[in-house]
Image (cartoon, rainbow, N blue to C red):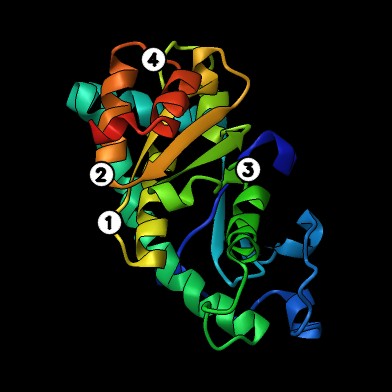
Amino acid sequence: MSLAQVNTIGTSTDLRLPANHLLKQKYPQRHFHYSLKDFFSFQTNTGTIDDWNECRNLLVSENFIVGLIAGLEEEVGDASGVLMYNIGQQWGQEDAKFFRNWFLQEYGYEDFSQLNLMYVLEAWWWPFIAQGWGNWEVDMSDQKNGFMFINIFDSAVARTLGDVGKPVCHIYAGLFAGFFSDLINKDLGCIEIQCYAMGETYCKFLLGKKDRIDAASFWHNEGATARDIQKKLHNGEYLK
């Protein structure tokens, strides 16, 4: 089974390992490690997989994701989505701390203040792409209005569950909320307003301040589409 056929789940700071990546040991200042064979180091003697960031990775099948979601729904019912969101949020907060230290050390910067935000964000999300979480697209055109949109293509969760008629990528929403809140030191929330598991071609998330997220959640529950929600937010209806 190839990496393309499974999901690779990365870890955070608590499972950082001694540097076992042979390519990184040979070229410690190399930054163009953007291929699977460069990013991952398969330790055949121990049966483990380390990545360029010195984190341990696990390969799991789609059955693992199905079992995880089904198990949570059986245990806590409709609250499973909230639980997955909270898991993602804590993950994002911890990953932001790890990323901040790793990024500055990896590229030799002293702080983020003079850096282009999209440059920083692409550096953060690249490992997630390699690990099978999907490609992304960030729309920050409404950042000044207190919200932004993130599109995820080929979500590991939505792709696995298929067309179930509802948003399922709660862990992504929590991850974005936790990471961005820590990164900019502001309390942000996130909601998925469009999902591949609803028959759409990709997943869309709204990240923003509480009043924006609360309004979007209400509209979404009332049957508004992602386009409807975008239009309402652009028109400033969340202020009413």
Q: State the separation of the CA atoms marked 2 and 3.
A: 22 Å
Q: State the separation of the CA atoms marked 2 and 1.
A: 8 Å
Any part of residue 1 in sight: no
| Of the image marks 1 and 3, the number of the one nearer the N terminus | 3
Q: Amino acid at mark 1?
A: Asp
Residue 225, percent from left and from top: 45, 16
| Of the image marks 2 and 3, the number of the one nearer the N terminus | 3
Residue 156, percent from left and from top: 56, 34
| Residue bearing the label numbered 4 | 224
Figure check: 105 above or below 195:
below
Q: Mark 4: few, some, or many residues within 10 Å (few <14, many ≥20)?
A: some
Comparing 47 with 122, the one in front is 122
| Of the image marks 4 and 1, the number of the one nearer the N terminus | 1
Q: Quadrant of residue 152?
A: top right
Cβ atoms under marks 4 and 1 closer than 8 Å: no
Q: State the separation of the CA atoms marked 3 and 4.
A: 22 Å
Left or right: residue 117 versus residue 12 is: right
Cβ atoms under marks 2 and 1 closer than 8 Å: yes
Q: Quadrant of the N terminus?
A: top right
| Residue bearing the label numbered 3 | 137
Left or right: residue 7 versus residue 161 is: right
